Image (cartoon, grey):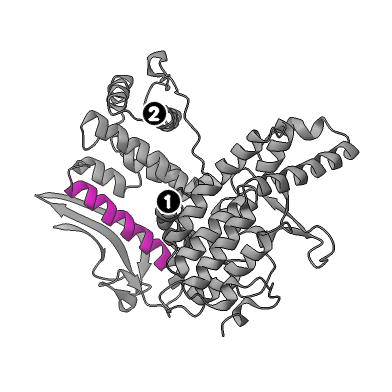
Amino acid sequence: MGAQIFLKSGTNKAGKAPLFIYAQHKGKKFKKNIGISIDPKDWNKRTYQVKNDSISSVKINRKLLELTSTIREAWSLYESDIYTWEEFCQKLNGGKPESDVESFIEEVFKPRMRLTTYSAYKYSFMALKKAIGVDKLSFKELNHDNIDKAVMTWRYEEKSPNTIETYLKHLGVIINEANDRGLVNYKFEKKKKWRVKKHTKRVESTTPEKLLESIDNVNDLYDFQTFAFWLLMFCMRGLYPRDLVSMYKHEMINEDQCDKKRYVNHKRSKTGELMQILYSCEPTEWIINSLQCSLSLTHLNRPHYLPDVYPKRWHTLILFEYEEKHHRNVWDIYTKRCRKLVGVPFKVARKTFESYAMLLDVSAEVRYRLLGHQDRSIKSNYQNWEWDRLSEKVDEAHIKILKEFRIEEIWNKLQKRGRDIGLHISVVTRTVIIGNPRDFVS
């Protein structure tokens, strides 16, 4: 009972035997030759692999791994009553069971999307199933009546308009893709009654007074780093964590010239918009330097089972150096502490910066440049000399916002708090250290 890969007894003239899939349950049987023949002495029936020293073993083992994964997934869905026996057999034959929407989403969307995007589509489908109270849903049941029922449920649960819009958008893409493949005979059509009126949402922000008060909550090195990261995001005109860790990858202007303004031509991770950011204004460089020093104490020479995310080489703006898959692992500890410690999450640094720009009557053109918003019309409406003047206004507004927010006062108090709780002297020093960050540890 079950499904496995078997080696047929007996060999052909070349001394090889074919591999086949065999499944059996409650008197029902399935058998399929998978088109691979091997020398019986090379077969490992425990791992479903051929020995590594056999001819073409790498290619064969890769296919066997894929088949094994498919068999296990299909059998699991069959045992869970999500697949019928016929659908299970269809899956093993390389088909796509029409009634299995979730499997369809995985097979069609997962290979061509980022993991986060694919997960969002799958989550929208799961939200639909939960809203209408079912454990599984066929394409036949993925219809407007059930979507209508789900929308009513989401409204009753007071889901936000944006959330409902996202659910409907994702479900529409799934249905239309299924229609293109002949699995359903209708296209998604959004009903007017599904529209949810969007309410004006108050933009969350904070004030210098609140931050100065919150600094008293800093009690250890991770608290200090969390607060410093928030201030750095504000000083860098509302960058997010993904931006902070990629700043060093972008072009620098006047990096080694202390008597000139120093910039980074940073492209926002979210929009790709170019932001020429002045980082030599007080106290941005001091914050970066203190973070570089403190991160050497928390992230250098960590246990082998933790990813090595500390920079291998020095750069003026480098904080971490890691692959995308480690991003959440690195930032989880700071994200979880931020609201409790600072009083607001990291993203509010950006909202606060924009709020102060509006309070200071900064023009829309300059605000767009400050925040890195997408507005292709701005550049096209300016001559080069006008563009240079606009860049000057961006710098002026940037510095004005930092002063209005009393950012130096906040940073100075955070440094003092660091000294009061006994942090390493290099963490709170006002001396910029040049050299390999791995040498910061004493």
Dot 1: within a 10 Å radius of its alpha carbon, few (fewer than 14), some, or many (20 or more) residues? some
Q: Amino acid at mark 1?
A: Arg
Q: Give percent across and percent down for residue 40.
A: 30, 75
Name the foreground residue: 100 vs 229.
Answer: 229
Among the 4 quarters of the image, the one containing residue 97: top left
* Magenta span main SS: helix
In the picture provided, is 406 more to the left or to the right than 294?
right
Magenta residues span 61-80
- Which residue: 43% across, 32% down? 166
The magenta stretch spans residue 76:
yes
> Residue furthest toward the top?
192
What secondary structure is found at the residue carrying circle 1?
Answer: helix
Q: Quadrant of the C terminus?
A: bottom right
> Residue furthest toward the right?
385
Whether residue 105 is situated above or below residue 437 in the rendered picture: above
How far apart, in angstroms, are the residues tagged by discs 1 and 2? 26 Å
The magenta stretch spans residue 129:
no
Q: Quadrant of the N terminus?
A: bottom left
Name the foreground residue: 80 vs 329.
Answer: 329
Q: Is residue 8 visible?
A: yes
Among the 4 quarters of the image, the one containing residue 167: top left
Q: Give percent across and percent down for residue 79.
A: 17, 49
Residue picked out by circle 2: 164
What secondary structure is found at the residue carrying circle 2?
Answer: helix
- Which residue: 62% across, 63% down? 287
In the picture provided, is 364 more to the left or to the right than 223?
right
Q: Earlier in the sequence, mark 1 or mark 2?
A: 2
Q: Amino acid at mark 2?
A: Ile
Residue picked out by circle 1: 339
Mark nearest the camera among 1 and 2 is: 1
Name the foreground residue: 22 vs 377.
Answer: 377
- Which residue: 60% across, 80% down? 440
